[in-house]
Amino acid sequence: MAPSDLREIIRHGLLSFPVTPFDAQDRFAPDPFKAHLDWLSAYDVAGLIVAGGTGEMFSLTPAEIVDVVRAAREVSGDAPVIAGCGYGTRVACDLAREIEAAGGDGILLLPHYLTEAPQRGVADRIRAVCKATDMGVIVYNRGQARISAETLEQLADECPNLIGFKDGTGDIDTVRRVTIRLGDRLSYIGGMPTHELFAQAYRGAGMPTYSSAVFNFVPETALAFHKAFVDGDEAGCETLLREFYYPFAEIRDRCAGYAVSAVKAGVRLRGFDAGPVRAPLTDLTEEEVEMMRNLIEGRG
């Protein structure tokens, strides 16, 4: 898929990030993964990004990420397959090429890990990955890989396949500078954990859409919120925030990493064999699973 076409597809619709199932031997389980994707395909969204943050990309090997892409390609039909990509620059470049060879249409470039880096170094990494692939590249502004509006504009001029900017920092000032400075050159995606809690504020900063992790297990609720958001139905958004999103956030905030673990628990509660999360994440306790069960009862 041409990067410009992918940019337009993801510009306004809801995006989500499927979990990555593991079997009893802690291996990627393609059959449950494909069954979950097949279920989600009945709901109208702009796209799914596999092996992303909710998909535990940080705990997957590069080979496993490619296996996830191949599995997604088998069931995606004509829908674009976008995949998480990251780690060090050399690894990220090699992984981008392998994702493309496996049938991927685009990548979400997640941050490098551990070390701090100056703007020039962050830009060099993004530039190298863009040059390593013909696919569309979405930059995830988060953690150690924060990028300024000025640097992003320079990269957009140099790299035609740089198509998107996803923010997970909560820095509305930078988000607004980016959206004003680059305009329609990029697509903009809100990417805070449980972004529905922040979506209305981000809309004011020029971000018309976002990614929804809860789409994994309550797609009806996720789409209802997105419709209210798009329609400017503030009362509808507030009702769903009170009834679902804030109670979910209370469970999520009980332990570090539960932004992923709670979503995976929700997928299991919907009847999919998603398996446990991988260390360093931990699964919900039995009490917390019951809290999730009560929360999602009647929502699909």
Image (cartoon, rainbow, N blue to C red):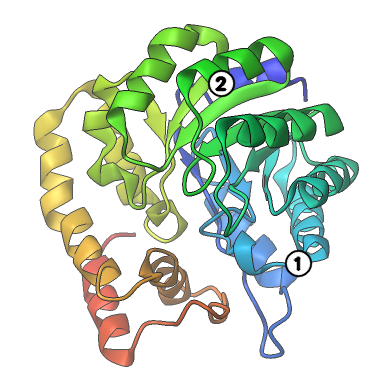
Residue 145 visible in the picture: yes
Circle 1 crowding by C-alpha within 10 Å: few under 14, some 14–19, many from 20: few
Residue 189, x across and y down, in percent? 45, 31
Q: Secondary structure at mark 1?
A: loop
Residue 186 visible in the picture: no
Image check: 75 left or right of 195? Answer: right
Question: Label 1, on which residue?
Answer: 61
Q: Which residue is at 68% across, 33% downward?
A: 126
Say the numbered circle drawn on residue 152.
Answer: 2
Q: Is residue 287 above or below residue 42?
A: below
Residue 209, x across and y down, in percent? 39, 29
Q: Which residue is at 58% across, 34% downward?
A: 139
- Going by the numbered disc 2, the residue's amino acid type is Leu
Q: Which residue is at 29% across, 67% downward?
A: 252
Residue 250, x across and y down, in percent? 19, 67
* Image quarter (top left, top right, bottom left or bottom right) of the C terminus: bottom left
Q: Secondary structure at mark 2?
A: helix
Image check: 217 left or right of 68? Answer: left
